[in-house]
Amino acid sequence: MKVAVLTGGGDCPGLNAVIRAVVRRATEHGFEMMGLRDGWKGLLEDNHFRLTRETTSGILHRGGTILGTSRVNPFKVENGLEKVKRAVERNGIHAIIAIGGEGTLSAATRMSQEGLRIVGVPKTIDNDLNGTDFTFGFDTAVTIATDAIDRLHSTAESHKRVIVCEVMGRHVGWIATYAGIAGGADVILVPEIPADLKKVAEHIQRRNASGRTFSIVVVAEGTLVKASPDQDEHLITSGALDEAGRPRLGGVGSIVAQQIEQRTGFETRVSVLGHIQRGGVPTAHDRVLATRFGVHACDMVARGEFGQMAALRGNDIVSVDLALATKELKRVPEEFFKVAQVFFG
Amino acid sequence: MKVAVLTGGGDCPGLNAVIRAVVRRATEHGFEMMGLRDGWKGLLEDNHFRLTRETTSGILHRGGTILGTSRVNPFKVENGLEKVKRAVERNGIHAIIAIGGEGTLSAATRMSQEGLRIVGVPKTIDNDLNGTDFTFGFDTAVTIATDAIDRLHSTAESHKRVIVCEVMGRHVGWIATYAGIAGGADVILVPEIPADLKKVAEHIQRRNASGRTFSIVVVAEGTLVKASPDQDEHLITSGALDEAGRPRLGGVGSIVAQQIEQRTGFETRVSVLGHIQRGGVPTAHDRVLATRFGVHACDMVARGEFGQMAALRGNDIVSVDLALATKELKRVPEEFFKVAQVFFG
Amino acid sequence: MKVAVLTGGGDCPGLNAVIRAVVRRATEHGFEMMGLRDGWKGLLEDNHFRLTRETTSGILHRGGTILGTSRVNPFKVENGLEKVKRAVERNGIHAIIAIGGEGTLSAATRMSQEGLRIVGVPKTIDNDLNGTDFTFGFDTAVTIATDAIDRLHSTAESHKRVIVCEVMGRHVGWIATYAGIAGGADVILVPEIPADLKKVAEHIQRRNASGRTFSIVVVAEGTLVKASPDQDEHLITSGALDEAGRPRLGGVGSIVAQQIEQRTGFETRVSVLGHIQRGGVPTAHDRVLATRFGVHACDMVARGEFGQMAALRGNDIVSVDLALATKELKRVPEEFFKVAQVFFG
Amino acid sequence: MKVAVLTGGGDCPGLNAVIRAVVRRATEHGFEMMGLRDGWKGLLEDNHFRLTRETTSGILHRGGTILGTSRVNPFKVENGLEKVKRAVERNGIHAIIAIGGEGTLSAATRMSQEGLRIVGVPKTIDNDLNGTDFTFGFDTAVTIATDAIDRLHSTAESHKRVIVCEVMGRHVGWIATYAGIAGGADVILVPEIPADLKKVAEHIQRRNASGRTFSIVVVAEGTLVKASPDQDEHLITSGALDEAGRPRLGGVGSIVAQQIEQRTGFETRVSVLGHIQRGGVPTAHDRVLATRFGVHACDMVARGEFGQMAALRGNDIVSVDLALATKELKRVPEEFFKVAQVFFG
């Protein structure tokens, strides 16, 4: 029985750990594993290779994906679905394990509805996929961001500065919230709460008045900011978005820093973490989660649990409906904003 | 309202993060915080100091505990309970937040039953406390052990050796299981499954026969090993225990290494991680968990939830009965042994 | 005998290690140590405090400086020199240990020429101070940049992208050269060699043609780039400089990335490391160097070696003329560009 | 022109970086590179493979050696030298680059004297090879040991304990000295100075009397200790040596800990770092040094500098006589013991 596996979307620490676990578990089930290159593209273009215990040896802790990845969506390719179906038939593929985020799992859900045998593994460093408590890659991203905040802290304190640290999080503030709490940030700004920079500035001024002459502000890249004091609405200024209307790297961070400096008169700097949050060696936590997801996904194929994905609930790995993943964004619960003892925008 | 806080038992990364969170939250509730030095000892000997936002500043990421710790148990001190009660009265202590492991929480449970107002925060790097999914310090210990295993891997491979890595885990194999999976160990030995070294040796020989000329064996310090081939029973040999019958540092690791070398003829080395697993900077994950525990514990005092402790369930912090923590050991569930794709004992 | 110590200029990992070493060594010489707050400013404004073994305990591995820092230059303050002299007299200061970079040491040199007893300790993460082989903080900066490049590597490979990583180095390319070599960069661009982006693009295209479908480009922030193909001169475009004509954070990185994408057609991203390179926990290497510098500086005061600074020559700490430090920039020697097996601009 | 490369002796972070640099540089010189498996053994047994840019891709930051290693010494094999000469001729090997420590370089020196064309690259984490200021692997070992000491510090302080940390260093105390200084140890014991445990205990008691209720003692594995107070001579007790008279892992550390506990009455623990110091990812510093050594070694072959090895002098890579490396041990200079502000033995 031939089973194909692919990785789609952005890089995420732990992808190779999932692939390795799938392949090792496959041996026990007697599956023959086929690796599709560069996501769905490998299926459309018959670009694949055999995965064995040997070809997946030593990759557990490596960043990236030995399969390569792309954002190719079969539903945006002419006759894409038809091509996928023919490729599946031509190659004798019994089932596909699709490891990916919002885009990959949306496509997987539709293909599953079209009758293909698909099992999903949720992947997002942002932790915004629904249906699972956590995803691999998130802990690594939080760890990298926290290390950075630790370093910025000493500089902010020595120079009596405000430092704004922009972290990933286009739609949700999980990374900002976790790294902000772990790094002892003074202000955390997240997409869940539009940020009022007047209040942020006042908070920083209060800190200063009580002798704390520096502040660390962590802001998720997708946070909406009220950039000028007389705006009635929460608006992200144009400079923070690219032509496609998506947050521009460093966009929000720069605006927040400028505004704070203008309003408080305190020297303010911005640090944009960017791509370093999504690559490289996964943390121990993410390697374990990725391995468990990979094992479970292979077992799902064996049990015929198609149209479903592996998910973490509490400390158990379970199977949930694929459609659940992309049904809605998993936002940071209010509890965090209440208890964090941090000023949330 | 005066609230006292203490840390008891062994060092654990995240203790200072709990203390800081308790103190900051206390400000919002209007509590005056008193830090007891060296666990229950500080209460018995009136050795304490005032905790404020200032005295707990900058400690979030520091290892150790600014309160100090000890293993003093009031119930093993003459008239200990009476002394505790008088100290509580004398100092006008409304409630005590006890951060500690099996020993500290057992004492806390009994004191609570004797009418004292106590709230617990579970602390163990071993993750063997019942009633909570995870405790802070565990992720840090796993991270340190995984880093070590990563390093041992390259040496084992270059030298074509077996390397046995002994990690903490007196009663349970959580650290061994997580670090073993994250580090790609070939064999994991845990207290939950008495280890048959004959089978372990055979497994390593099979690996060798298939061209994998090195192996990594992770063993929890409290694992029971069948040390000689003709033993009917699972026995830990005397050398692995100290006079008090507790595992001796390096005891099991050495036995396992000797046995593997004898049985396989392969050069085998042992690495005993020891104390480095329980000190120093906590991971981002543990800082967040510790902070949430601290905030919750303070809220429990405000709500009068005495005789209870903060606990993690899924991704929620909840209050559970204090007695639950020490009712039974939280063992590694069988699922892990099945899916780990690793040879377990 | 009262000896004052100050830290000036930008944050640099290892400052606290120097301070601690100075203070501990001072005990042996019988000096009373005075810490000046925020560089020369503390001297001008009589803002200082006593430094003892106790007040410098536990700071060896901490980022930042417990003395605070500023860029205040007494020679730019009205009657600054006179004020400094009066403050020295008023406070009975026998000698000053000035820990700082180009600005601080220039001022120290002039003050020394004016008759003040001054000893210098060179500080720069850029490693561009003359007269010493290395400075503390540089190894930490290189380590942080290398970690980042390691992470970017996996993403570049998975996505078949070019990633441009901008690192510190306003005038020289030490960080870029070391981190680029350590991180296995494919192209390193440094201020020592004006960058011809046409050649860079051709090099990346050659890599691609030979099957290496990703590239890592490390660029120092102060690199001069020939931004358009028909420019006769090496010009940094205006966007890369701020109003004061200094490199703007992310300026060069963005230009290099845009140019590569335009010329090659390959998807290209930029990562700007910025401030995280100059704060936080120093590496073991930098702690040792900083400690040796601090001990030596204190011994220099005892021996009356004023107008000089501590310096590393081979593996020896020696005293050299203060003026030497800022006489010229210490550039990366050509040997590195020849042997690095990397394409240099 | 065919050039062979081998790695001999113990694992050392940076070996792969040397191999990669040699191979990449070889392309420029037009050499064909042959990798010998498991040191000299690969030459004796005709076990080798071709090294190309492709087969050495992605190994820069990996621990271990893709060539494998062994301690096989041709001069201890019957007719070893003759066999080596015949193998060299049979395979058309123009020159050999031998990367190794005391054993490998001794053999290389003799072979060179016997007329073989050999170039050496010094390798030792202990930094005890003569003729070079530093070797790759040393900085990594120091970094790992310092991380461990940082962690032990928090535990020692929380528990008011003495912790003895045994690090590598069979003949010299480089790792102990550097990691001890970087980690802020209170006592450092090295092979260069026989340790008087009576004085060590007195020093720890003085610390305690002045309120510093914990101490960190770093001891190199090869330190000679005066174990009982009435010994006239400096003797290492039998338990610290194995049958071959070499230091036993944990031997000296345990003795030092026992003695301190007995003499001071303070609770004392031992931590033995062992093999984790010599494997895994090299630091940025070691990757740069290893790369420069590899490039230089290849250039030495091109220039015909046989019977010599690459060495670091100041910040220059130079060629020195091979025999120099093993002529005498490179001990830690006295300057370190004087200035370290630490109690040495």
Image: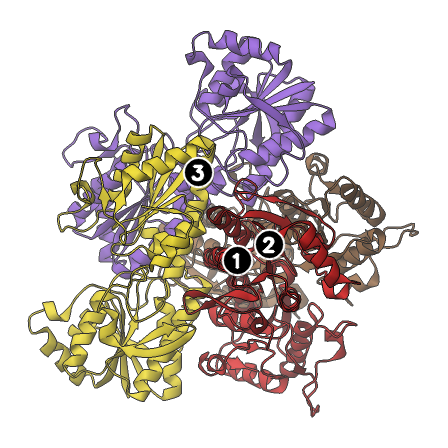
Chain colours: A red, B yellow, C brown, D purple
How far apart marks 3 and 2 lie (CA) works out to 46 Å
Which residue is at the front of the view, C330 or C304?
C330
Q: Amino acid at mark 2?
A: His
B13 relative to D313 in the view: left or right: left
Residue occupied by mark 3: D278
Q: Nearer the viewer, mark 3 or mark 2?
A: 2
Looking at the rendered structure, whether the residues under marks 2 and 1 are on a common chain is answered as yes
User: Residue at image x 9%, y 69%?
Assistant: B77
Q: Amino acid at mark 3?
A: Arg
Residue occupied by mark 2: A94
User: Residue at image x 46%, y 78%?
Assistant: A340
Q: Chain of mark 2?
A: A
Mark 3 secondary-structure assignment: helix
Mark 3 packing: few (<14 Cα in 10 Å), some, or many (20+)? many
Residue occupied by mark 1: A301
D238 relative to D88 in the view: left or right: left
User: Residue B317: x percent and y percent?
Assistant: 38, 76
Looking at the image, residue D306 lies above or below residue C2: above
Q: Amino acid at mark 1?
A: Val
Q: Quadrant of residue C199?
A: top right
Q: Chain of mark 3?
A: D
